[in-house]
Amino acid sequence: MHRPSTSSNNNERGAATCPPIPPEQRSPYDGGGAPFFDQFAYSIEETARITSLGRTAVYEEIKARPLKARKAGRRTVVIADDIRQWLASLPQINGVE
């Protein structure tokens, strides 16, 4: 049987929760739940997380060339400005510009 937590800083499973994010740091793309573009370059995993896509979809966009990526040794990184440009280039729903 599940026992409710007595701490206000824990979620249902007892894990600590993060404090709320101030409105000025919320992203218009992620429902306002996390800071967005707070660093210069992102890994594939980070790019997938902030764009709400899977890793495979990110790699497909890179391969098809709408999303630019760079190699640093064995690591593939995506520059924040390239993510912004790619997101802005995506078609809007119902063709509304």
Image (cartoon, rainbow, N blue to C red):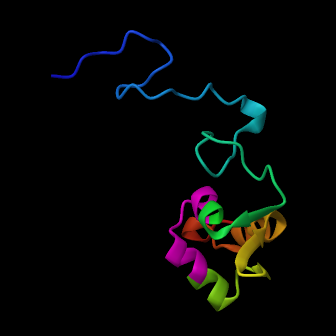
Magenta region, main secondary structure: helix
The image shows a total of numbered marks equal to: 0
Q: In this view, does 45 lie to the left or right of 54?
A: right
- Quadrant in the rendering for residue 46: bottom right
Q: Which of 34 and 11 is in front in this view?
A: 11
- Decide: is 2 above or below 94: above
Q: In this view, does 32 lie to the left or right of 3?
A: right
* Residue that appears at 71% across and 77% down: 76
Residue 93, image x, y percentages: 56, 66
Residue 16, image x, y percentages: 50, 26
Q: Is residue 8 left or right of residue 75?
A: left
Residue 70, image x, y percentages: 79, 80
Looking at the rendering, the stretch of residues picked out in magenta corresponds to 48-59
- Decide: is 27 above or below 62: above
Looking at the image, the residue that sits furthest to the bottom is: 64
Q: Which of 54 and 10 is in front in this view?
A: 10
Residue 60, image x, y percentages: 57, 84
Q: Which of 22 and 9 is in front in this view?
A: 9
- Decide: is 86 above or below 62: above
Q: Which of 61 and 71 is in front in this view?
A: 71
* Residue that appears at 61% across and 71% down: 95
Residue 80 magenta-drawn? no
Looking at the image, the residue that sits furthest to the top is: 6
* Residue that appears at 59% across and 81% down: 59
Residue 49 magenta-drawn? yes
- Quadrant in which the N terminus is drawn: top left
- Decide: is 67 above or below 93: below
- Quadrant in which the C terminus is drawn: bottom right
- Quadrant in the rendering for residue 11: top left
Looking at the image, the residue that sits furthest to the front is: 73
